[in-house]
Amino acid sequence: MSKKRLLLLIPVFFLTSCGGYSTSYLVNGDAYNSPIFQENYYTHWDDEFKDAVKVSKAVDVLHFDELFKIDAQVFEKYSNTREYGKDYRMNSVNEMFNYGVQSKLFDGQMVCGAQDGHPEKAYQLARVQINTDGFSMRFSKESDDLKYFAFQYKATTDNTVQKVYKVGTDELAKSDADMYHNSTVNLSISLYTKTDDGIVNNEFTFSEVFESKTTNRGDYYKFTAFDLRSYNLSRLIGISVKYTFDDELINWNKEKGVDIDYALFLYEMFIPHTSWH
Protein backbone atom coordinates (compact mmCIF):
# COMPACT_ATOMS: atom_id res chain seq x y z
CA MET A 1 0.00 0.00 0.00
CA SER A 2 1.40 3.41 -0.97
CA LYS A 3 2.09 6.06 1.64
CA LYS A 4 -0.44 8.35 -0.04
CA ARG A 5 -3.25 5.80 0.22
CA LEU A 6 -2.32 5.10 3.86
CA LEU A 7 -2.59 8.79 4.68
CA LEU A 8 -6.06 8.84 3.16
CA LEU A 9 -7.17 5.95 5.34
CA ILE A 10 -5.88 7.37 8.62
CA PRO A 11 -8.56 10.10 8.92
CA VAL A 12 -11.28 7.58 8.04
CA PHE A 13 -10.08 5.23 10.77
CA PHE A 14 -9.91 8.05 13.29
CA LEU A 15 -13.41 9.28 12.52
CA THR A 16 -15.04 5.86 12.64
CA SER A 17 -13.18 4.65 15.73
CA CYS A 18 -13.91 7.61 18.02
CA GLY A 19 -17.33 8.16 19.55
CA GLY A 20 -19.37 10.88 17.90
CA TYR A 21 -17.53 11.43 14.64
CA SER A 22 -18.39 9.44 11.53
CA THR A 23 -17.54 9.39 7.86
CA SER A 24 -20.36 11.93 7.30
CA TYR A 25 -17.87 14.58 8.40
CA LEU A 26 -15.48 13.80 5.54
CA VAL A 27 -15.44 16.24 2.63
CA ASN A 28 -15.09 15.17 -0.99
CA GLY A 29 -13.00 17.38 -3.24
CA ASP A 30 -14.05 21.03 -3.25
CA ALA A 31 -17.41 20.58 -1.53
CA TYR A 32 -18.62 23.86 0.00
CA ASN A 33 -15.94 25.80 -1.90
CA SER A 34 -17.98 26.60 -5.01
CA PRO A 35 -17.97 30.11 -6.55
CA ILE A 36 -21.76 29.66 -6.76
CA PHE A 37 -23.20 31.08 -3.54
CA GLN A 38 -26.10 28.63 -3.19
CA GLU A 39 -23.85 25.57 -3.43
CA ASN A 40 -21.88 26.31 -0.26
CA TYR A 41 -24.48 25.86 2.47
CA TYR A 42 -23.46 23.34 5.10
CA THR A 43 -26.55 21.82 6.73
CA HIS A 44 -25.40 18.71 8.62
CA TRP A 45 -27.40 17.91 11.77
CA ASP A 46 -26.59 15.19 14.29
CA ASP A 47 -29.68 13.18 15.21
CA GLU A 48 -28.84 12.90 18.90
CA PHE A 49 -29.09 16.69 19.30
CA LYS A 50 -32.55 17.05 17.79
CA ASP A 51 -34.38 15.82 20.90
CA ALA A 52 -32.04 17.25 23.52
CA VAL A 53 -33.71 18.98 26.46
CA LYS A 54 -33.51 22.71 25.77
CA VAL A 55 -32.59 25.15 28.51
CA SER A 56 -32.54 28.82 27.51
CA LYS A 57 -29.69 30.88 28.93
CA ALA A 58 -29.54 34.63 29.39
CA VAL A 59 -26.38 35.96 27.79
CA ASP A 60 -24.31 39.11 27.94
CA VAL A 61 -22.57 39.53 24.60
CA LEU A 62 -18.96 40.68 24.76
CA HIS A 63 -17.03 41.87 21.72
CA PHE A 64 -13.29 41.59 21.25
CA ASP A 65 -12.34 44.80 23.01
CA GLU A 66 -14.34 43.67 26.05
CA LEU A 67 -12.95 40.15 26.25
CA PHE A 68 -10.42 41.09 28.93
CA LYS A 69 -13.34 40.99 31.41
CA ILE A 70 -13.10 37.21 31.13
CA ASP A 71 -9.57 36.63 29.87
CA ALA A 72 -6.96 39.13 31.02
CA GLN A 73 -4.36 37.62 28.71
CA VAL A 74 -6.29 38.88 25.69
CA PHE A 75 -6.28 42.47 26.90
CA GLU A 76 -2.58 42.36 27.67
CA LYS A 77 -1.35 40.60 24.55
CA TYR A 78 -3.62 41.08 21.52
CA SER A 79 -4.57 44.17 19.55
CA ASN A 80 -6.70 42.39 16.91
CA THR A 81 -8.64 39.20 16.27
CA ARG A 82 -6.20 37.80 13.69
CA GLU A 83 -3.41 37.52 16.25
CA TYR A 84 -5.85 36.09 18.77
CA GLY A 85 -6.98 33.52 16.22
CA LYS A 86 -3.46 32.28 15.59
CA ASP A 87 -2.78 31.59 19.26
CA TYR A 88 -6.24 30.43 20.37
CA ARG A 89 -7.14 28.16 17.44
CA MET A 90 -8.64 24.90 18.63
CA ASN A 91 -6.77 22.60 16.24
CA SER A 92 -3.65 23.31 18.27
CA VAL A 93 -5.45 22.13 21.42
CA ASN A 94 -6.76 18.75 20.29
CA GLU A 95 -6.48 16.65 17.13
CA MET A 96 -10.26 16.11 16.90
CA PHE A 97 -10.64 19.67 15.55
CA ASN A 98 -8.70 18.81 12.37
CA TYR A 99 -11.35 16.88 10.44
CA GLY A 100 -14.17 17.64 8.03
CA VAL A 101 -15.57 20.90 6.72
CA GLN A 102 -15.94 22.00 10.34
CA SER A 103 -12.18 22.11 10.72
CA LYS A 104 -12.37 25.50 8.99
CA LEU A 105 -13.79 26.79 12.26
CA PHE A 106 -10.75 25.79 14.28
CA ASP A 107 -7.70 26.69 12.16
CA GLY A 108 -7.21 30.34 13.13
CA GLN A 109 -8.40 31.84 9.82
CA MET A 110 -10.46 34.79 11.03
CA VAL A 111 -11.33 36.49 7.74
CA CYS A 112 -11.79 35.83 4.02
CA GLY A 113 -8.87 36.48 1.72
CA ALA A 114 -5.29 35.29 1.48
CA GLN A 115 -3.05 36.07 4.41
CA ASP A 116 0.20 34.96 5.98
CA GLY A 117 1.49 33.53 2.69
CA HIS A 118 -1.41 31.08 2.28
CA PRO A 119 -3.37 32.08 -0.84
CA GLU A 120 -5.11 28.71 -0.79
CA LYS A 121 -6.94 29.83 2.34
CA ALA A 122 -8.86 32.55 0.50
CA TYR A 123 -12.62 33.03 0.40
CA GLN A 124 -14.72 29.87 0.82
CA LEU A 125 -11.78 27.93 2.26
CA ALA A 126 -11.82 30.15 5.35
CA ARG A 127 -15.47 29.85 6.30
CA VAL A 128 -18.47 27.61 6.92
CA GLN A 129 -21.57 29.02 5.21
CA ILE A 130 -24.98 28.24 6.69
CA ASN A 131 -28.61 29.08 5.94
CA THR A 132 -31.34 29.63 8.53
CA ASP A 133 -31.72 25.86 9.10
CA GLY A 134 -28.25 25.95 10.64
CA PHE A 135 -25.95 23.04 11.38
CA SER A 136 -24.48 21.07 14.25
CA MET A 137 -21.19 19.38 15.05
CA ARG A 138 -20.54 16.48 17.41
CA PHE A 139 -17.20 16.29 19.21
CA SER A 140 -15.48 12.96 19.81
CA LYS A 141 -14.37 14.01 23.31
CA GLU A 142 -15.86 15.81 26.31
CA SER A 143 -14.69 19.04 27.87
CA ASP A 144 -14.00 19.96 31.43
CA ASP A 145 -15.44 23.21 32.86
CA LEU A 146 -16.14 25.91 30.28
CA LYS A 147 -14.83 29.43 30.89
CA TYR A 148 -16.15 31.15 27.77
CA PHE A 149 -17.18 30.53 24.18
CA ALA A 150 -16.37 32.93 21.32
CA PHE A 151 -16.72 33.06 17.57
CA GLN A 152 -16.07 35.30 14.55
CA TYR A 153 -18.64 35.66 11.77
CA LYS A 154 -20.21 37.83 9.10
CA ALA A 155 -23.73 37.99 7.63
CA THR A 156 -24.09 38.82 3.96
CA THR A 157 -26.26 38.70 0.86
CA ASP A 158 -25.30 36.98 -2.37
CA ASN A 159 -23.20 39.52 -4.27
CA THR A 160 -23.27 37.52 -7.54
CA VAL A 161 -26.88 38.47 -8.36
CA GLN A 162 -26.84 40.47 -11.60
CA LYS A 163 -30.10 42.40 -11.18
CA VAL A 164 -30.44 44.13 -7.81
CA TYR A 165 -32.54 47.19 -7.00
CA LYS A 166 -31.21 49.90 -4.71
CA VAL A 167 -33.18 49.95 -1.46
CA GLY A 168 -36.22 52.22 -1.68
CA THR A 169 -35.82 52.97 -5.40
CA ASP A 170 -36.66 51.65 -8.84
CA GLU A 171 -33.01 51.98 -9.87
CA LEU A 172 -30.74 49.02 -10.44
CA ALA A 173 -27.55 48.86 -8.41
CA LYS A 174 -24.46 49.68 -10.45
CA SER A 175 -21.77 49.65 -7.75
CA ASP A 176 -21.03 48.29 -4.31
CA ALA A 177 -22.17 51.55 -2.75
CA ASP A 178 -25.60 51.14 -4.37
CA MET A 179 -26.05 47.91 -2.39
CA TYR A 180 -25.24 49.26 1.07
CA HIS A 181 -28.03 48.39 3.48
CA ASN A 182 -28.92 47.34 7.03
CA SER A 183 -29.49 43.86 8.34
CA THR A 184 -30.39 42.27 11.69
CA VAL A 185 -29.37 38.71 12.55
CA ASN A 186 -30.98 36.80 15.43
CA LEU A 187 -28.63 34.01 16.45
CA SER A 188 -29.20 30.86 18.46
CA ILE A 189 -26.02 29.17 19.68
CA SER A 190 -26.50 25.82 21.41
CA LEU A 191 -23.86 24.17 23.57
CA TYR A 192 -24.74 20.51 24.09
CA THR A 193 -23.60 19.04 27.39
CA LYS A 194 -23.81 15.46 28.55
CA THR A 195 -25.43 14.51 31.85
CA ASP A 196 -26.34 11.25 33.56
CA ASP A 197 -29.89 11.77 32.28
CA GLY A 198 -29.03 12.55 28.69
CA ILE A 199 -28.02 15.54 26.55
CA VAL A 200 -28.90 19.13 27.45
CA ASN A 201 -29.21 21.88 24.85
CA ASN A 202 -27.92 25.04 26.53
CA GLU A 203 -29.30 27.66 24.14
CA PHE A 204 -27.91 31.21 24.00
CA THR A 205 -29.84 33.72 21.86
CA PHE A 206 -28.97 37.29 20.89
CA SER A 207 -29.20 39.76 18.01
CA GLU A 208 -26.58 41.66 16.05
CA VAL A 209 -27.13 44.57 13.68
CA PHE A 210 -24.99 44.91 10.57
CA GLU A 211 -25.21 48.53 9.48
CA SER A 212 -24.92 50.10 6.03
CA LYS A 213 -22.07 48.70 3.92
CA THR A 214 -21.19 45.99 6.42
CA THR A 215 -23.70 43.47 5.01
CA ASN A 216 -22.53 43.38 1.41
CA ARG A 217 -19.04 42.98 0.02
CA GLY A 218 -17.47 44.93 2.84
CA ASP A 219 -14.93 43.15 5.02
CA TYR A 220 -16.81 43.59 8.26
CA TYR A 221 -16.71 40.89 10.91
CA LYS A 222 -18.30 40.40 14.30
CA PHE A 223 -16.47 38.81 17.22
CA THR A 224 -18.78 37.65 20.01
CA ALA A 225 -18.02 35.97 23.33
CA PHE A 226 -20.22 34.50 26.08
CA ASP A 227 -19.13 34.35 29.71
CA LEU A 228 -19.96 30.79 30.80
CA ARG A 229 -18.44 30.74 34.27
CA SER A 230 -21.71 31.27 36.17
CA TYR A 231 -23.45 28.37 34.39
CA ASN A 232 -21.09 25.63 35.62
CA LEU A 233 -21.13 23.92 32.23
CA SER A 234 -18.91 20.93 31.54
CA ARG A 235 -18.90 17.76 29.45
CA LEU A 236 -19.49 19.73 26.24
CA ILE A 237 -20.00 17.29 23.36
CA GLY A 238 -21.28 19.49 20.56
CA ILE A 239 -22.41 22.84 19.20
CA SER A 240 -25.10 24.05 16.82
CA VAL A 241 -25.89 27.40 15.20
CA LYS A 242 -29.20 28.63 13.78
CA TYR A 243 -30.49 32.10 12.94
CA THR A 244 -33.24 34.27 11.53
CA PHE A 245 -32.68 37.60 9.82
CA ASP A 246 -34.30 40.80 8.57
CA ASP A 247 -32.48 42.34 5.61
CA GLU A 248 -33.74 45.50 3.89
CA LEU A 249 -32.04 44.76 0.54
CA ILE A 250 -33.66 41.33 0.35
CA ASN A 251 -37.04 42.68 1.50
CA TRP A 252 -37.05 45.46 -1.09
CA ASN A 253 -35.94 43.24 -3.97
CA LYS A 254 -38.51 40.60 -3.08
CA GLU A 255 -41.18 43.25 -3.66
CA LYS A 256 -39.59 43.80 -7.07
CA GLY A 257 -39.64 40.10 -7.90
CA VAL A 258 -35.90 39.57 -7.38
CA ASP A 259 -34.75 36.78 -5.06
CA ILE A 260 -31.43 37.17 -3.23
CA ASP A 261 -29.87 34.55 -0.98
CA TYR A 262 -28.59 35.34 2.50
CA ALA A 263 -25.99 33.52 4.56
CA LEU A 264 -24.15 33.51 7.84
CA PHE A 265 -20.42 33.00 7.33
CA LEU A 266 -18.71 31.43 10.33
CA TYR A 267 -14.95 31.90 10.38
CA GLU A 268 -13.75 30.63 13.72
CA MET A 269 -14.93 29.25 17.06
CA PHE A 270 -13.05 29.28 20.36
CA ILE A 271 -13.44 27.35 23.60
CA PRO A 272 -10.36 28.59 25.44
CA HIS A 273 -8.70 27.29 28.58
CA THR A 274 -10.58 24.00 28.33
CA SER A 275 -9.24 20.45 28.43
CA TRP A 276 -10.69 17.52 26.45
CA HIS A 277 -10.86 13.88 27.42
Image: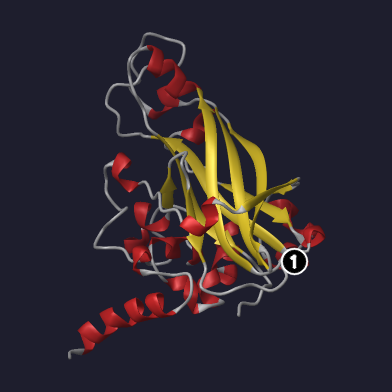
Quadrant housing the N terminus: bottom left
Residue beneath label 1, please? Answer: 76
Q: Quadrant of residue 9?
A: bottom left
Q: Residues within 10 Å of mark 1 (few under 14, many from 20)?
A: few
Residue 20, above or below 5: above
Position above or below: 24 against 141: above
Residue 16 percent across, percent down from the top left: 38, 76
- Which quarter of the figure has residue 185? top right
- The amino acid type, in three-letter code, at marker 1 is Glu
Given residues 197 and 87, the one toward you in this image is 197
Q: Residue at x 48, y 75 (%)?
A: 19
In the picture, measured across the screen, residue 149 lies left or right of residue 9, that is right
> In the image, is residue 72 above or below residue 209?
below
Q: Give residue 189's position: percent from left, percent from top.
A: 60, 49
Identity of the residue drawn at 49% across and 55% down: 136
Residue 39 position (above or below residue 167): below
Front in this rendered view, residue 39 or 43? 43
- Furthest-front residue in view? 197
Question: Could you tell me residue 184's position as x and y percent?
Answer: 57, 31
Q: Residue furthest left?
A: 1
Comparing 175 with 27, the one in front is: 27
Image coordinates for residue 160, horizontal then vertical, percent: 30, 34
Element at label 1? helix
Instruction: Judge from the rendering whether residue 221 lies leftward or rightward of residue 5; answer left or right.
Output: right
Rendered residue at 69%/69% (across/down): 196
In the rendered image, is residue 166 in sight? no
- Residue closest to the eye, 160 or 225: 225
